[in-house]
Image (cartoon, rainbow, N blue to C red):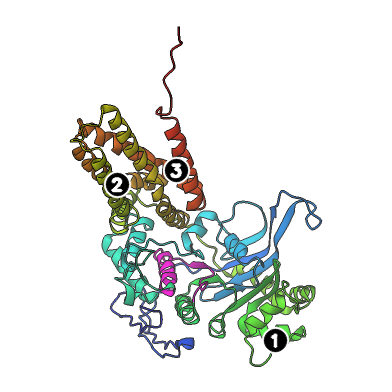
């Protein structure tokens, strides 16, 4: 169901803080369809946090000296300052390569390389790593989701993996229902996410699902990287409308947006415009027009201010503004001074963020959840095992008929080639698992970064979850060959094929964990198996005896 469908949010869920019901009317904007929903009473964030940063600079070593970078250091950000308080929606904008995502990654504490200078404060005091991770969530630009599960199943499994073991099943269900309502996912609650084999929810719903996953931990700070990337105007409006509602819960929301529409722009509290890593503007949205007008840049009456000033700050094309003037003009403006004063005042006016650590989850509980998820995914996703099972069954029938036991011309030496080909082909085709494992790896990396996912539990669950599928492949592949060819010791043959497939699948998992793209992994896997086949001993010739 599309994003422009009518969204009806029930009000039967009990929340932590009772407020007067809010019934905002959502104007679908570009879709020209008017619909509204009964908003449930909003919950208030338990630990409201103000995130501020002062004189942030970031540079990386390019390993190559140039005229522009004689010391091989490339500067990405230069003295960037800003502040976002509870209830505010701050958008970081700018042309491509301006440093938007880099700034967000630094604020999210996700950059470990390069040189970072400057200060980051949480409620007026220096940010602590563990406390910040406990009160914040990060939504990446790409949606990392498993297409074999419904929206509700995805959220319930994410909750069981990320929330502490002290949270009961009833509380998990209640929290899942809450975020489903908060992000308007009730209409697609029982719809599959979708993958290459079947159509699922829309792009806008996937984006909202990714956000809903991070809301399960009830963060005080939500950081989103390009939440509207790849969406049409109606989907973009719906995603940002639900994000803006989170600010009414006293959540601090910071996102990067490449070029917002006028409808999305009107939802923002603060706006930051970067160009080449420098600040052209940071401050309230309502003050942006007057600031640029004071520098001589007046926005035409019927033009979107965000689009107009981003074009002025874009140095990739002709017609841009005087960048040094824009940067220095903002640095000397009352807005910049006011933000500096506010950050200074936060150290005394705000209560410093108390030390909070995310309660750990049980590795055993994570193992059980991951094992169940892998088994269900292997069962529902036809590309992981079912396609190979069908292919191997057909091929085994062909091989069995070629070496029928009733064929008197077949000698024992021919059976050696039959067994060798059957085993080698089955092992070689294990490279087919690479695309699906790399997809699962993206989900693992997201879960690992945003929660305390135990790596050992993930590896064991992945290994155990693959065993039933591998056994079915071995059984279907050897049964016809063994019966038609009249092989003796069928049990030994089945065991050898099964163990060979276990080793091959495990090797492909190792390769997939090391490469960035499945095509590279398949090339490496094919080379490895080709090397193994070459060295297995069949290609060696018997030494010739010397003639007397």
**Residue 291 colored magenta?**
no
For image coordinates 73% across by 75% down, the residue present is 317
**Viewer-side label of 1, 2:** 2
Residue range of the region highlighted in magenta in the rendering: 204-231
Question: First in sequence: mark 1 or mark 2?
Answer: 1
Gap between marks 1 and 2, in whole Å? 73 Å
Q: Mark 1 points at which residue?
A: 290
In this rendering, the answer to whether 156 lies above or below 367 is below
- Closest to the observer: 541 or 197? 541
Q: Quadrant of residue 351?
A: bottom right
Tell me where residue 47 appears, x and y as whole percent: 46, 67
Tell me where residue 276 appears, x and y as whole percent: 71, 67
> Is there a contact, CB below 8 Å, between mark 2 and mark 3?
no
**Quadrant of the snapshot with the C terminus:** top left
Which residue is situated farthest in the top direction here? 548
In this rendering, the answer to whether 408 lies above or below 427 is above
Q: In which quarter of the image is residue 84?
A: bottom right
Q: How crowded is mark 3: few (under 14 residues within 10 Å), some or many (20 or more)?
A: some
Question: First in sequence: mark 1 or mark 3?
Answer: 1
Q: Is residue 454 visible?
A: no
**Quadrant of the snapshot with the N terminus:** bottom left
Q: What element carries label 3?
A: helix
**Viewer-side label of 1, 3:** 3
Q: Mark 3 points at which residue?
A: 510
For image coordinates 21% across by 41% down, the residue present is 479
Q: Residues within 10 Å of mark 1 (few under 14, many from 20)?
A: few
Q: Mark 2 points at which residue?
A: 395
């Amino acid at each position: 169901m599309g994003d422009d469908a009518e969204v009806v949010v029930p009000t039967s869920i009990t929340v932590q803080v009772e407020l007067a019901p809010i019934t905002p009317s959502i104007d679908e904007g570009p879709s020209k369809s008017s619909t509204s929903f009964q908003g449930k009473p909003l919950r208030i964030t338990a630990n409201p946090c103000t995130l501020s940063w002062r004189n942030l600079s970031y540079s990386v070593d390019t390993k190559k000296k140039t005229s522009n970078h004689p010391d091989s250091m490339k500067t990405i950000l230069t003295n960037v300052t800003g502040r976002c308080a509870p209830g505010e929606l701050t958008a970081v904008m700018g042309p491509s390569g301006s440093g938007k995502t880099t700034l967000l990654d630094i604020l999210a504490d996700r950059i470990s390389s390069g040189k970072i200078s400057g200060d980051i404060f949480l409620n007026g005091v220096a940010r602590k790593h563990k406390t910040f991770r406990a009160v914040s969530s990060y939504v990446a630009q790409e949606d990392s989701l498993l297409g074999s599960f419904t929206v509700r199943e995805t959220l319930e499994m994410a909750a069981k993996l990320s929330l502490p073991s002290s949270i009961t099943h009833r509380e998990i269900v209640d929290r899942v229902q809450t975020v489903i309502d908060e992000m308007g996912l009730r209409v697609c609650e029982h719809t599959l996410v979708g993958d290459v084999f079947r159509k699922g929810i829309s792009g806008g719903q996937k984006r909202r699902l990714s956000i809903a996953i991070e809301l399960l931990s009830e963060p005080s700070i939500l950081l989103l990287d390009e939440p509207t990337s790849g969406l049409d105007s109606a989907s973009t409006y719906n995603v940002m409308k639900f994000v803006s509602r989170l600010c009414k819960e006293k959540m601090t929301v910071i996102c990067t947006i490449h070029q917002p529409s006028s409808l999305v722009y009107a939802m923002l509290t603060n706006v930051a415009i970067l160009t080449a890593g420098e600040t052209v503007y940071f401050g309230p949205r309502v003050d942006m027009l007057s600031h640029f007008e004071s520098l001589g840049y007046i926005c035409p009456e019927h033009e979107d201010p965000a689009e107009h000033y981003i074009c002025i700050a874009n140095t990739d094309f002709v017609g841009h503004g005087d960048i040094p003037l824009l940067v220095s003009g903002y640095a000397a403006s009352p807005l910049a001074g006011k933000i500096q004063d506010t950050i200074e005042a936060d150290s005394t006016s705000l209560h410093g963020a108390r030390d909070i650590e995310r309660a750990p989850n049980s590795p055993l509980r994570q193992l059980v959840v991951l094992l169940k998820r892998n088994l269900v995914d292997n069962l529902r996703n036809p590309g992981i095992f079912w396609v190979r099972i069908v292919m191997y069954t057909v091929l085994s029938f062909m091989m069995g008929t070629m070496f029928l036991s009733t064929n008197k011309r077949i000698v024992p030496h021919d059976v050696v080639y039959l067994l060798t080909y059957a085993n080698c082909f089955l092992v070689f085709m294990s490279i087919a698992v690479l695309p699906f494992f790399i997809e699962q790896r993206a989900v693992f990396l997201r879960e690992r970064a945003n929660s305390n996912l135990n790596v050992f539990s993930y590896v064991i669950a992945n290994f155990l979850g693959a065993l039933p599928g591998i056994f079915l492949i071995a059984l279907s592949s050897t049964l016809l060959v063994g019966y038609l060819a009249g092989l003796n010791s069928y049990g030994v043959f089945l065991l050898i094929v099964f163990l060979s497939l276990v080793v091959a699948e495990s090797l492909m998992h190792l390769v997939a964990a090391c490469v960035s793209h499945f095509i590279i992994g398949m090339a490496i896997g094919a080379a490895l198996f080709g090397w193994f086949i070459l060295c297995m001993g069949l290609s060696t010739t018997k030494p010739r005896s010397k003639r007397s």
